[in-house]
Structures are given as C-alpha cells and as structure tokens.
Amino acid sequence: MSLNVIKKVIDLGDGRTIEIETGKLAKQADGSVVVKMGDTMLLATVVSSPEAKEGVDFMPLSVDYQEKYASTGRIPGGFLRREARLSDYEVLISRLVDRALRPLFPDDYHADTQVMITLISADKDIMPDCLAGLAASAALAVSDIPFNGPISEVRVAKIDGKLVINPTLSQLANATLEFIVAGSEFDINMVEGESKEIQEAELVEAIKFAHEHIKIHCLIQRELTIAVGKTEKRTYSHENHNEELKKAIYAATYEQVYAIAASASAKDERSAKFKEVRDTYIETLGEIDDVTKFLAKKYYHDVEYDAIRNLVLDEGKRLDGRTTTQIRPIWSEVGYLPSAHGSAIFTRGETQSLTTVTLGAKDDEQMIDGAFINGYQKFLLHYNFPGFSTGEVRPNRGAGRREIGHGNLAMRSLKQVLPSDDENPYTIRVVSDILESNGSSSMATVCAGTLALMDAGVKIKAPVTGIAMGLITNEMGTKYAILSDILGDEDHLGDMDFKVTGTSTGITAVQMDLKINGLSYEVLTKALDQAKDGRLHILNEISKTMSAPREDYKPHAPRIVTLKIDKEYIGAVIGPGGKIIQEMQRETGATINIEEKDNQGIVQVFADNKAAIDAAVSRIRAIAARPEVGEIYEGKVKSIMPFGAFVEIMPGKDGLLHISEIDHKRFETMDGIFKVGDEVRVKLLDIDKQGKLKLSRKALLPKPERTEPAK
C-alpha cells in the first residue's frame, strides 16, 4: 500500500524545527496531521458533519485535547488504569485552541465540527500546549472544511531579559512573563498568560514578537494546503434568509430597542422590556411556520446587537447609563465567615463573589497525575458558578470548562504575589462562590481572593485586582469605543473580552479574546492603559476595606512549625515501619510530615492547637537532638552490666555510666545500685570516635569533705 505523505518544516530560527506531516495517520478524518517538535508529537484530527441540524444558528464546535500516558512511558493511576475524563490541564489546553479557532469559522457555518488533539509522544522538556493550536489549524488546512485561517499558537516568554518562542519547560522557571498568543497571519485573536508585575509596554512588545513567528507558521500551512490540493472548500447552505422580514423587523423595532437600551434600566427590567418588544412584534405576524418564527427571533437579536452598539458609538452611553471608563459601585467586607481561616465578599455592580481561604498541611497538597505534568500543587483556587447567580434554574453537575478556565485565570493572577515556600509552609485553598453575576465574575474572584488571603494572614507581596475590558467598533473599523468593567450583555455583544489583573506595580495575568479582525496595536495599547486606570481604581476601593495582610493568622487557624534536622535522624523520627511517627501523631494529635531536602530533614508539624504542636515538637527535638559534651540529662536506666549501667539520655541514645562514675565512693559490684527503669541524672563527659557516650553521675555529686587522720 502506497502512502502519499507530505511534510512541511517550520524553522524557529535557533536550530529548532517543527515538522507537520499529513497522509500517514487517521486518513478517514476530514483532516489529519501529526505535528512534531523534538520527541513531542501531536495527532490532530478534524471532522465536520456534511449538513447542519435544523434550528441551529451558531457554530457547534467541540475541541478536545488529550494526553496518552504511553506518550511518556507511564501507566495511568486510579482503579481503572486507563485514560478517563479530561484533566483540568487538558481542559485548559482545549479551551486555548477553541478560543483561537472559533472566531475564524464563517458566521453562517453551523455544521457539528469536532477537533481532537492527542499527545502521542512526549519530550519531557518540550511543552505540547503551545503546539496544539498549530496542529488543529493544520488539520483544518488539509481538509475541505470552510475556515478563515490558518492560525497558530505560540508561547512567548522573557528569560534573562530576552524574548523566546516556545521555550523549554526548564527554561520557564526563570521567566518573568509567559503568554500563549494565537492569531492569523494578519491579526492576533487570543492571549492568555501570567507575568511578574510587568508594564503594559512590555506586554505589547511580547505580543508583537509572538505574532512575527505566528505569521511564519501560517504561511507554511498555506503551502501545506496547496500541496495536498485542498484550496477549494466544501459548499454549504446552513441558513435560511428572508430579507423582507429582516427589513420589516428593523423598521418596526429598532427605535423601541434603542430607547430601552438608552433608558439605563436594571438588568432584569431591561431584559423583560426587550422580550416584550420581540414577542409583541411576532404576534403581529399571525400564524407563521417554525422557520419564520426562528428567523424573526434571529433578526430581532440582530436589532438588539446593532442598537446597543450604536448607542455606545454614537452617544458614548452604555446599557446601565455609565460612560465608557466608569467602574460600577464597589463594596467589600472581610471576615464575614467566623469559622473560615479567611473570607471576603467583593461586590461590583451586579457581580458578587464570596471567597474563602483554607490553610492546610502538606498532606493537603493536590497530586497532579497527568501524562506530561505530574507532581504536587500547594496553591489551589476553585471557582463555582451556580445557576442562581444569574437567576436561572440549572442542575449542579460540578465544574465545567468555563469554571475551570475562570478559576485558572484567577489562580495565575494571585500566585504571583504569594510568599515563597520557605515563608509559607501552608497548602492554601481559595474558593470563590459567585453569588451574583453580570459581567466579569473571574475578576471579582481575583479581588475577593486578595481580600480573603489578607484576612487569613497570608503575607502576600501586594494586593491584586482585575478588570474586564470590552471593545465595540463600527463595520469599517473607523470608529471604536473601549469599555471598562463590561456587563454580561456587553461581553456578548462586543468585539473583545480583555481581562487584565495586576498590582499597583504591574500586570500579573492577562486573558484576551477577539471576535473581529484588525485590532491595531494602538487600540490595544489604549485598552491596556484604560485597564490600568480601572484596576488601580478598584485597588483603591478594596484598600479601604483592607490594605495589608493581618499580622497573624486567625486564632482558630491551624499552625505549622517547620524544623530542620540532620539527615541521619530522619529514620529515627519515622521509626521502623513508621512506628515512631505514627505513635507521635496518635498521642499528640498533630500531623507530622518529613522529607529530605538539600541534604537535610525538613519536618512540618501541623495542628490546630498549641499544646499539640509543642508536644510533638518536643518529642522530635528529643529524637533528633545531638548530645553535647558537658550537658546534663535526665536519663533512664535501660540495662545493667557488671561494669556499669547503660542510660538512655535521649530517645534512642544510650551512654555508659561506668561503675567508677556512679559515686565518689567505690562500688565492687552493681548489685542493688540501680534497677532497670530508674531515672538518673547524669552529665555527658565525652563522645569517642565511635560515637559512644561516656556518662557520669559522680560529676554532679558534691565531693565528700576530706577528713584529717587522728593523731
């Protein structure tokens, strides 16, 4: 069987290359490629249904990234020992690809489309996430599926002051910024990442640098499309049209909708009025078929879209009456939950987060068991978005992709200001429960998380706040408005969703999604500057509630004491089969963790009361302490020999109390002097080269007075 394998190579300019291969694997998919960099290989496939389903007026796209454990030579953990549901890490990569692809499908293409990206081989130092978008786009490029690409994604990082594309995992440890940037050869359409309080100009510089490399990736994909003969894409007709109905709806409803939009009504009132206008018009149509009714609702949605956007562009006025730069009213409170280790409420307009902080021990760290990423994580942030936050009835089925993505953005924002592991012994879990939502609940999570961490006494380096920005442009791109602190409706109807978080010093995280082409760097810079003003305003508002961490943890918060012991005593603290450490935990009520690090034993003692910690620390110190010559010890007789007694002066440390060192008077035998278990006070005289201890009781007794002989 002959194969028509076609390869293209992307030169990264520093000796590294990326290969794209098609024609060998998964040939029954509409498009299939293997992307390889080093030993990392991704298989990307795309399949799109021939026809759209009835009544669908959106792009039903699903993107799944999955890692095969065999790619790293590992067997999955868990009972089933097989790949299961996508991990949070896989979901986050799936979202990155989805957000880059979705805006570039034709607006009128509504066929079910599935993109699957699989890690089939992994180089442990080459990260696959920055290749996933390229692989997905290349699969579309070799298919006949309509797509206004190609696109690519790259990771840009600044390492030792120099910008690097797709750095290795080991290089990222020294990065001051790290962003995944996606775009076509003409425009950027997605940015996500984190940084160590960088300035706005530095972010723009990094995006520009990434885009230059993205352009090269796109040109190579165009060559690939020509090579496989897929320049002609499939024809389709997924929408019904009724231009007369569209014109009639605009004529009958536009002025009413514009007036409602300009009335600055509350969210629920505004929604009810919009719905009333729509339903009233549809009633005037009399008996109509389902297709006409569907089109009427669609065209009315277009009326709302145009009216709200025109209100902003023509009058600089928004749905709730604010100007483009105005931030909604803010109030916040800390310590609301008396039993939590830290808690805060942050409310901005109609968006509210109740956030808690819980301090845990090392045992509470999250184990990450992925094919590529595995290990432990001691900072966790979970975001919950229940239906009641938007007044909806929705079953609680656990965290979805949106919740995972929003939580990850907030986690990235806050982790930049956490104290180092040496300064913070705790595992920290932050949980944001969104109680109300009308725009940017992820940014509310960042603000509430900052307050809750400070309320818990966690010594963060600086408070972090965040803001969501929007953009509205006209069709020609000649007129635009940048919106600060966007509403939910403005997110849906706008051309950009741009979230920026940071301290007073600089940016800690960014997430940007563009729905249009042609965003200039001038507009991007203006949006960043306006975002800075907004987040500094929010920072000033929350500082009125709390501006710095508490001096100490809450009285009911658990305490951790960290001890460093000599490496040789680790086994003595643990005991045979864990006997000693388990006994200490059982008897004191403390949790004890011990690990070897930097050729030392690091012991963490965790408990919710001081007595338990003191008892455990005392016993550990007794086991791990080094006997010191000249010190006095309260010992216990462990055994008796003809030449003396062996006395335990510390747990596991015995010394010889020779018969000649028991008293100033001379003893011929040990009979009747001690019995096993007797307590005896001794002084350590010497430690010989073999580590044997020489004890003396005599040295602690007063010398008998010397009597003169009788004359």
Image (cartoon, rainbow, N blue to C red):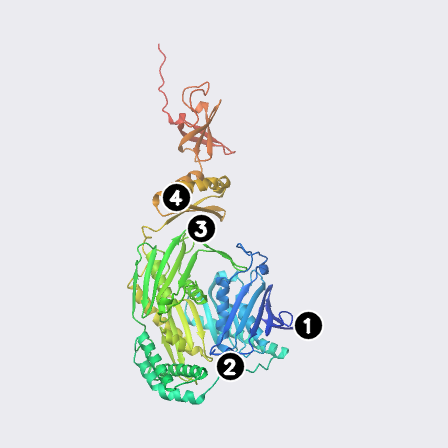
Seen as rendered, the residue at the extreme bottom is 244
Tag 3: Cα neighbours inside 10 Å, few (<14), some, or many (≥20)? few
Which residue is tagged 3? 363
Quarter-wise, where is residue 125 in the image?
Answer: bottom right
Q: How many marks?
A: 4
Tag 2: Cα neighbours inside 10 Å, few (<14), some, or many (≥20)? some
Please state which amino acid type lies under the numbered disc 2: His
Which residue is tagged 4? 589
Q: CA distance from mark 3 to mark 1?
A: 53 Å
Which residue appears at 40% of the width and 70% of the height?
499
Residue 127 visible in the current orientation: no
Tell which circle, 2 or 3, labels the residue nearer the N-terminal end: 2
Seen as rendered, the residue at the extreme top is 711
Please state which amino acid type lies under the numbered disc 4: Gly
Tell which circle, 4 or 1, labels the residue nearer the N-terminal end: 1
Please state which amino acid type lies under the numbered disc 3: Asp
Which residue is tagged 2? 238
